[in-house]
Structure formats: C-alpha cells, structure tokens
Image (cartoon, coloured by chain):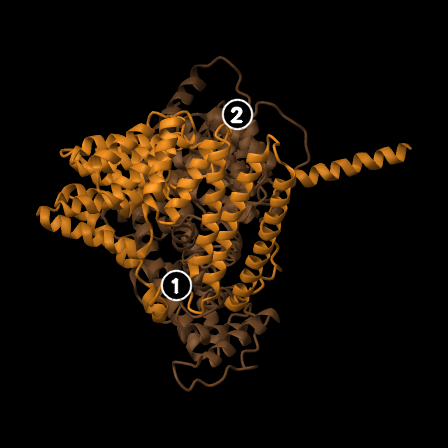
Amino acid sequence: MKSRHIYSVCLMFCLVGLAGTLRAAPPDDQTYVYEQKNEAEEKRRYLVKLNQDKEKCDLAIINTKTLIARSKNRPYLPEIYLRLAELYIEKSRIAYFLRKSNQADGGEQALDQYESNMLKQQAIEIYQRLLNQYADFAYIDKVHFFMAHEYRELGQIDEMIKHYQVIIAKYPQSDYAPEAHLLLGDYFFSQKQDVDQSTHHYEQVLKYPQSPATGAAKYKLAWCRINLVDYKGALVLFEESVMSPQAKKDLNIDTYRRVDVRLESLVDMAFCYPEVYKDAKPEEALAYFKRYAWSRPVYSTVLEKLAYRYYVKKKWAQSAAIYRELAFIRQEPEKLLEFAKHIFECVQAIGHYQNAEKDVAIIVRALEKQKFPSMWPRRTKTS
Amino acid sequence: MTTYQRFIMILAMIIGVSLGGPGWCATPSSTTPAAVPQTDWDQDKPPEKKDTQMSEQDGRYLFDKGYEFYTRKKHAEASQYLHQFLSRHTPDTVDYEWAEFFFGISLKELGYTHASVDILSHLVGRKPNPKIVNYTLEVLEQISLEGPFDRDLLVDRALCDHSYGFIEDHMSDFVHYYHGEYDWEHGLYEWGDEHFAKIQTNSYYYQKFLFKKALREYYRQRNDEAVELLKTALFNLPDGTVLKDDVRKTLARIYYETGKFEKADILYQHIEMNIVEQAQNLLERAWVHYRMGNPERAMGLLYSFQAPSYTNSFTPEFYILKSFIYKDVCHYKKAMQVLDQFRERYGDTLENIYQRRKPQDNNAMLLVILNKPRIKRLWEFLNTLESESAKCAQIQDPELKSYLERLYVLESEVSERRFRLLVNDEFEKMANNMLRFEEEAHLMEYEIGLDMYQRVHDFHYSEDDAQETDAGGTEVAKAVYQFQGEFWNDELDDYEVILPNKCQNAEEWDIFFK
C-alpha cells in the first residue's frame, strides 16, 4: 500500500514536471506532407454535400408539415410555421447553389433562380399566413423582417419597404426596428440617392444605442454628411463608429457584418481629416490616427490612405512626413519603394532638403531590399 | 581558422583589399570543408532541358520527382528537380507554392539555411494556404532557434510585415512574440503589449517576453520589477538554454548595480555557457569580487585572462580594474606597471584616435567591437554565409549552383555593408570610451601617486607596528596548488592570487623620503 502511494506521488511529480515543461519547437524529424489540390474532386464533394443537405431539408419540411397537421390549435403552432418558412428559405439557398454549381462555366443564368425563387415565394406565403392568422404571435416582428428580406431578394422593393415600415411603426421596441431603419437608409442612399431620407433613417438607428446596427449607421451617416460637404460632422461620426462597443451577437442578420465597419470607418477618417484639420501638423495627424488605430497593420493601412490623400491635395510636407513614418514601420520592398518615390516627389515639390539625410536613407533602404527580382525573375510575374 | 586569421579577414573586408586567399564570401573556393556532408548529386539527374518553357506534363513530372525524393529524404536530388520546376513555371502554376516549400526544406536539410530562409520567407508572405503557412512558419521558427539567420528577411519581412490570422497555437506564440517585439522597437508599446498578452504563459516565447519586459523595466529604472520578471523567467526556463544564461547575466548585473554582490556572484557562477566564451562574465565577476572586498579572488579571475583562449578578449576595463586592485593593497609599482601595460596595448589605438584614422587601422579596438552583441550576431551570420557559400561548389546542377551562388554573393555583399556600417558606428562610440579610459588611467596614475605620498606620511608618523597582512585581513590555512603556467578551461574561473596588503610596509623607494 505504502509503495503504491509512493508510486502515485512519483507519477504525480512526473505529470507536474511534464505540465511545467516549456513547450518546445516541433521535433526536427517532423515530415511535411503534400496536400494535393484537386478542384474536380473538391467540386464533386461540394455537390454531394449540397445534395445531402437538400435531402435533409426535404425530410425536415415533410416532418414539419406532419407536425403542423398534428398540432392544430396548439399554442406553439406559429413557431412551427415559422420553422417551415425558414426551411423553405434554406432549401431555396441550396437549390440556387446546386443549380449554379452544375453549370460548367460557373456562370449564372436566368433559369438558375427559378426554383430558388419558387421556394422563396412558398416561404413568403407561410409568413403571410402567420400575419393573417396569428397577429398576436410573439415573433411577428421577426416575420415582417424576414418577409421584407425575401421581398428584397425577389426584387419586390415596394413590398420590402412596406414591411420595414410596419416594423418601425408597430414594433419600435423590437430588435429589428433599428435594422429596418438601417436597411431603409441604405435603400434611400444607394437606390434613390435621397440623402435626406437616408439621413433620417440612419439617425433613427442611433436612438437604439444598444443595437449592433449603430456602428454601421454611424459609418453610413458619416457618408451622408460627406455628401452634404459636412466633413467635420462626418469625422465625428467616423470616430464614434470606430469607438463603438462590440456588437451584440444574438441577432441573425448579415446586412452589415460582411464588412469590417470599424476598419472602414477608420480608413475613411483619412479622407475627412485633411478637410477638417487643414492646418494640422504631420505629428498631430500621426498622433491622432495612432489614438484611433488598434494595431500596427491597421495604423499603416490608414496612414497609407492619409499620406496619399495629402499627396493628392498637394500638401507635400504632410504627405512626406507620413510616408516617412510608413517607411519606418513597414518592411515590404515594393511598399518601401512606393513610399520612397512619393517622398522624393514631395521633397522635390517642397523645394528644400531639410530631411535629406533621412530621406536618402529611406531611398537606399528601399533599393537595398529590391534584391529579389534579380534572383528569380519569373517569380515576380504574378506575386 | 584561428580567430586572428578571421580578424585579418575582417580587416580585409573593411579595407576592401584582396589578400590573395579564398574570397570573402564571394565565389566558393575549390576546397570543400571537411565538415560538409558529401551528397550523391550525380544520381537520378533530372532530364535534360530542351526548352525553357516545359509542357504541363513535364512540369508535373519535375514536381512529382522532386517530391518523391523529398519523401525519401534525398534532398540533394529533390532540390534539383524542384528548382527546375520553379524556374520553369510561374507562381500561378498548380502546386508552385508546395514546390517552393519543399525546395526550401530541402535546402535547409542540405545546410543552406539562408537560401531556405530566402525561399520560405517570400513564400509565407504570400499566404498561399493555411497548411503551407503553418508548415513554413514552423520551419522558419526552427531556423530562428538553431543558429544565425537574416533577421531582416525572417523577422521583419516574413513575420512582422504580415498579419497571420489562422495559425496554430504554438506558431501563434512565435508570431505574436516577434510582432510584439517589433512594435516595441518602433515605439508602439500598447500594440506590442497586446501581442505579448496573447502568448501562452507556458511557452518559451513567454519567457523570452519576460526577459524583454525586464530589460524595458530596467531602462525605465524600475529595478525591482525587472528583478521579479527575471526571477520568474529563470524559474521557468529549462537549463542549458542561451536565454537562461542571458537572464542570469542580466539579473547578476542588476544585483551588482544594487550592491547585492553575493547574489550576483552566484548567478555568474551558474552561467552554463562554455567558459572559453565567458571572458566578459569573468571580468564582471572580478568587479563583483572587487566590490565585495575580495581583491585576491578578483585578481585571480583577471589572471585567467592570460589564458590563450582569452588573448583577444582584453578590454580597457581589465587594466583599470587590475590597477585598482593593486592600488588598494598598496602594490604601487605593479599598479603603475598595469597602467603602462594599458598604454602599451592601446597606445597605438589612442594615437590612431587622436589622428582620426580609420577603424581598420585599429586592430585592438576592432577585437573589442566584435564582442558587441549586434555586431557579433552579424559576424556569426557572415560566417554562416561564408560556410554555406563554400558548399555551393559541391552542387552538380549548374542552374541550381548558379542560383545559390548568386544568392549568397548578393546576401554577403548586403551583410558586409551592414556590418561595415555597424562597425563604423560602434567604432565612434568605442573611440569615445577609449578616450574616457585614457582619462581614467591618468586619474588612476595621479591617485596612485597621491596614495604613495599618503602612505609614506602615515608610515613615518604612525605609532602602530607595521604588520604585513592579507588583503582580506585574516589568515586562513588552506592547501594551495601553485600555478604551473598551464591554463585549463575547467580552472579558468577558479584562480586565486595571494596579494599581501603592503600598505603597512616600507618599500625601496620609501628610503628616498627618509
């Protein structure tokens, strides 16, 4: 018994020792295995998966319909209808991709969308039935929102607007209300070029500070301000968009999450900054963007925009100073050459050479790093 | 090659004069170093090239053969086929990136680490696919841990100029560490902190970060924080790593500065690096003992500098400390002799500085400069380039040979230029230091003179009986092995010199004052 105890103590020490050991680099004899890329095989697998998904969807639709038939007058019946509509939407998506994948050239034809649209129509019918028969349904705002979305997909914009407006008018406290405003704002901005209307809707979104849509709304509102030549207002909104707290995650909407609103806002700040702070010194501009950026790559991205903006506006001193900062923090040979070229042009335009030593060092460094093409000319063709 | 020969080569490089021997990192010499493994280059030669543009089928054949040899660990053959594949296709060809990857590994396995870094760092920057990126980062990490490498290519360009999102945890530590370090070096501390915060605490890079952070705290004059960080790293790091030695050395230096000499001494003793490479540590330990009031031990440590291994490790500080010790125990004659030795060794150096001559005329200073960490790193990298460049002579495939030779010649030229600039910068600093040491030597001479007169005064007017005592003040009975004139590496840090305190004794020259 005692020896077993000693044994377990030893084992424990060994385990502790192992846990405490620093993880080292992978062993030297590790072999790396080639992974063949077979596009035809990948496509085949993708099609098989789509077909399997479609079958699952069909089965789910049948089962849901059976469930509906068995659930007459049950309180949860509207939820099952909602689920059925969602299944049709899912099937519509799969049908679209299946149709598209089966095209030899991967192109799109009018008929591709026929089956998909039919399924969307079926979903809309179910949504409509929910609206007609279950007006007190707890998720009726969601039904309106999804319906509007499908109408938009089908190109029935008037219907879309009608449903978004219902949400805004009848369910102002819904999570979907700011989304509806945002989408209406987009519609007026991009399709109607009606800046006033879009501004109105984006401003309404701001009344829902907890909504994840506020960041995007501020960003879009800033662009409305730019259209009205109000750069100062735009810059403030971009700043707020960058500093917006992280979005809530419980809303299943993909309208604005495809883009990094925060990054877009920061980059577009570079557009407004020279207009708002016309006499800002380069150091002030650098400090300003350092304050709003959240990493070096982001900082260098926005500085590139800013430097070029100054360059276009012929503010040579500012442009040169920012290109110098970029040359300090970046290492990519092509970029360094580009920065060096711009610095040279700016300095030429300014006409004095106070920073000649530093600028020549940047140019030399940029040229020094251009050693690759001579080694392997072919490799530079597309890279 | 001896250190002196290497040193002459540096001079040749700086002066830009050919010495008639093998070129400095230029075309490989005809002699193959003994250490270079012989490879069977002639076997399985790739097919003769009819045209520079090959059909897709031929191209595929080259890749397949190259990969087949790679899997059989026949890297010499693999590199030939893969090089042919790469030089006859463009990056939009299927599996071009895989070919680059396996070509890079084959070169590494053949001992061409720089060529491997060159290929792989360009590959990873293009982010071909997550698998290749992860694999490539692993190989680059191995190279970074194994020996000298081109930091500009591997760290600055391959790692820090790109963001890597989807990489495995271990690679993530490697990438975040260097991103953090790069941000700190460019004054972007907050973003650097964010990168460091993402490193897993059980990783090697976390300890590396602690070391880095401790240095930063030290420069901000926050010694306590620095000590705590270094102690943590010391506890976590496995024995036998260079980093652990660096941590010990830094901690010892801070202890020295804060007057904790015993702790400093223990840490210096724990340094595991080969004793032959520890000249600087021995000198620092001698200072520790001197400050502890243990001049005999300090002198013993300085004595080891006479060992042939340390011939080129002298620094002006060595002479200053030695004269301090002699002066403290009233060995004025010897103290003066040490100062004479200082002038003898650095007289020409000082004269060159006064005459504003070029660095290459200052051999003694160049030897000291070579020990500066940044220069030493680049020097080691140049040595690597030289040895790898020499291996190119073995390659049978003329295209691959030409490609590698050009790559090494170009990199050698760039690194030599960088080296030259660094040496010139460091030379300026060293020249100022040397003038300061000369001033200190003058001051020491003056103090010795002052002490001598003071002692004579005390000796003649003091009522106490003069007794010759040990520098330590106490006599301890112990076995002593007399020095036989031979230096053994395991004894280098163990010498003790008997230095009787002569402050109470009259010397010959005292008679002059009688």
Q: Amino acid at mark 1?
A: Gln
Dot 1: element: loop
Q: Is residue B228 above or below residue B400?
A: above
- Between B183 and B14, the residue placed more toward the observer is B183
- Between B371 and B219, the residue placed more toward the observer is B219
Where residue B197 appears, x then y in whole percent? 49, 35
User: In this figure, what is the number of numbered marks?
Assistant: 2
Q: Residue at x 49, y 65 (%)?
A: B98
Q: Quadrant of the C terminus of chain B?
A: top left
Q: Amino acid at mark 2?
A: Lys
- Mark 1 — residue? A109
Where residue B159 appears, x then y in whole percent? 43, 50
User: Marks 2 and 1, how far apart in space?
Assistant: 82 Å
Where residue B168 appears, x then y in whole percent? 54, 48
Q: Residue furthest top?
A: B463
Q: Residue furthest right?
A: A1
Residue B216: quarter of image? top left
Colour used to depict chain A in the structure image? orange
Horizontally, is A317 left or right of B505 in the view? left
- Mark 2 — residue? B260
Horizontally, is A280 left or right of A23 in the view? left
Q: Which mark is residue B28?
A: none
Horizontally, is A200 left or right of B316 in the view? left
Q: Residue at x 20, y 54 (%)?
A: A341
Q: Is residue A248 above or below residue A339?
A: above
Chain coloured brown here: B
Kindly identify which chain the residue marked by label 2 belongs to: B
